[in-house]
Amino acid sequence: MNLIWLIPCLPLFGFLVLLVAGRKLGDPGAGWWGTGVVAASFLVVVKVFFDLLALPEEERSLTQTLFTWIPSGSFEVSIGFLADPLSILMCLFITGIGALIHLYSIGYMKGDEKFSKFFLYLNLFLASMLLLVLGDNLLLTFLGWEGVGTCSYLLISFWHTDPANASAGKKAFVTNRIGDFGFMLGTFLVWITVGSINYADIGPAAPMIAGGTATAIALLFFLGAVGKSAQLPLSVWLPDAMAGPTPVSALIHAATMVTAGVYLITRLNPIMAQAGWANDVIAWTGAITALVAASIAIAQTDIKKVLAYSTVSQLGYMFLAVGTQTYVAGIFHMVTHAFFKALLFLGAGSVIMAMSHEQDMRKFGNLRKYLPVTFATFMIGWLAISGIPPLAGFWSKDEVLAGAFNAGPAGPVLWFIGLLVALMTAFYMTRVVIMTFYGSEKWRLTDDPHEAAESADLESEEVESEELVTASVAAAAHGDGHDDHHGLSPDHTPQESHWTMTAPLVILAGLSILGGAINLPFGSDFKRLEHWLEPTLAYEHELPPVPVLVLLACAAIAVASLGIFLAYLVYSKQKIAVEKIERPVLAHAWYIDETYAKVAGGPGEAGFQGLADFDGTVVDGAVNGVGAGVLGIGNKLRPIQSGFVRSYALGISIGGALLLAFIVTRMNL
Amino acid sequence: MLALNETWYLVLAAMIFTIGSVGLLTRKNPLVMFMCVELMLNAVNLTFVTFSKALDDIAGQAIVFFVMVVAAAEVVVGLGIIVAIMRRRQGANADDISLMRG
């Protein structure tokens, strides 16, 4: 019995029920319903997973076609689902983590007046995301791609009464559109060259695609991936997306949606194998994004912004892996990252709840005393992302770095950048941990450093007049989601969260510890993920030999420890001045937003003004000219209608006579 | 020998039609113009009946009935308009009523 169709349809059903009866189900009924359908979907995924496992390796690809969606001559698109090792792996962690985050949201969103609407959006998001990974053709993937984009927009601006949140949602949507444009053009090009947009046809046809065409297709789809996965130069929307509720940041902007770009590139790996230098573009974009984002994360004071830049940076790692054609490493890092980044975001959410929706880390401190469960799980997430063995992050990051090292002549350079990023990652995560859980209880201080920061931000706001920048600055200045009950008093006592919030933390912490076990480098028996994904990958670049691997791993561990130690020196021992590390250029994210605003506001606006003038004069002129011409001819012909009935009669008579003459003389009757 | 065959009827119809059309073009009185139109219509009716007889086809006579009905309706409307115009202005001729020009 084939149950694949149930996987996306269950959350969709949940969405429809919430649409009709969401308000009736209320708080927490709507939340339990939303969690239930996603958990059911997870069980179906597990069932399909075991069905696949029971099949011989080369037959592990089930397709289920429901009906023809667009029949149009030779172009036919059907609603069909493809369950192969890659898509089912994605489904496993999407529905698994999705169910946990739904559960968490029941506690986090408690008392919110739009409680049921939140779960409505979340269910719709999961349905779209599952459609994205399960679709058996590019157009269906695109449908899911747009669906998750829409849900992302709706959820970022969930508390839309604050203009900064609404503006952040718009920014995400507009930035994503640039990428979607690449996705669409790529789909067209695939259709022209292959004659089909089904993955089942693209795979076998890919080796016949000419190199130049394959490069073009790869770059177009990479543009789509850059938008969705927030890589440079389209990375600017993700940090602002933190305006949404924290579970949304965990689910959409860390664990699932933003990894869709990595999935897309991996799905199209047969084309990538022909794409030549496009792969280098992907690898370098990933490496540079990872470096830039990690450097920005060092100087952020908003806990969610640190995690957001960290996500951008880790996504850079994944693109580094797929760009060097070590897809297993990319997918492996995607899975482990989903575990520990969801854990870190949910932990941050728990902290934010305990601090009455304060997100500025400078007002935290010593929270380990008050939030034991959050603290313990957050520490596991911290060690995992820093790359300390034997936690999940170490194994996957190590594989990415090893793959980069072996990637041709430029490999060692890419590897070195990756290592630098690992150093920064350990540094900024340690900084978060120390500022949040250690030190003095700074929210009890009466002289408010937050005030000073706010005025500083206001100063910079005067310079930057553009809306997009104002959005990010305002989001940074306010820092909080719904600020109706915001503000810490000196006698505030933080409290540990409800079990619906801590239970997902504990489960994710367990996964962050053990997640590495799915692909250990100790010989081929341990490389389960690699064997599992093998049927879907046309080409996989080799990892270096074992002695080199061990050396690289030692270097990675040394660098991670160094990062943690440096952060300990700076933030705990205060041996090095903070100002030397947290440069303003980093706090302002290398002025990327400001530059975009300047370019878009200066030459960009002038260019578009020029286009508007062209439209106003040339295009409108042509249209109006035709109208004026017709009017002129009409005016010339007006006197013919004189109003004298007898002259009309004369015309008719003459015409009739001429007609008669013609018939009699010219036609042979 | 003067046999009263179809030609006579057709010539008569042509003459009536010509009288009607010349009258329509030369006279200015709307009532007279109206009568000229009636002459033309009935000239055509005459040809229909003639051909119906000659070709032994009843369709021609059937059409004549239609023409008569339409003509009667047209007279009602037309005379109504003329009476309405006459009430508003004295002794109008067709060339005076030329408001509907381009």
Image (tube, grey):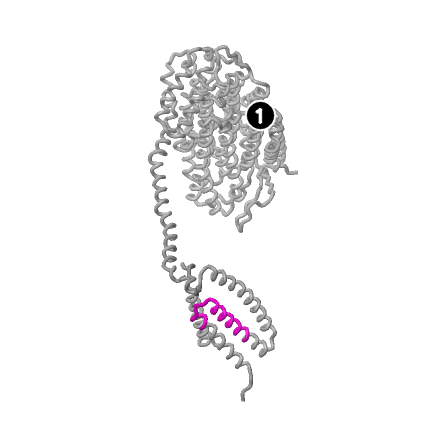
**Where in the figure is residue A425, as x and y percent of width and height?**
44, 22
Which residue is at the front of the view, A551 or A610? A610
Going by the picture, which residue comes out furthest to the right? A1
- Element under label 1? helix
Q: Is residue B11 above or below residue A572?
A: below
Q: Is residue A534 above or below residue A389?
A: below
| Quarter of the figure with the N terminus of chain A | top right
Q: How many marks?
A: 1
Answer whether residue A645 is magenta in the image: no
What residue is rendered at 55% in x and 39% in y? A135
The image quarter containing residue A662 is: bottom left
State the extent of the magenta-drawn residues as a range.
B22-46
Q: In this figure, which residue is indicated by the disc labeled 1?
A: A100
**Where in the figure is residue A178, as x and y percent of width and height?**
43, 37
Q: Is residue A631 above or below residue A396?
A: below
Quick check: A148 left or right of A624?
right
The amino acid at mark 1 is Leu
Which residue is at the front of the view, B28 or A167? B28
Answer whether residue B44 is magenta in the image: yes
* Residue A7 in view of the camera: no
Crowding at dot 1, Cα within 10 Å, few <14 / some 14-19 / many 20+, comes out as many
For mark 1, name the chain.
Answer: A
**Where in the figure is residue A552, as x and y percent of width and height?**
44, 24
Q: Main secondary structure of the magenta part?
A: helix
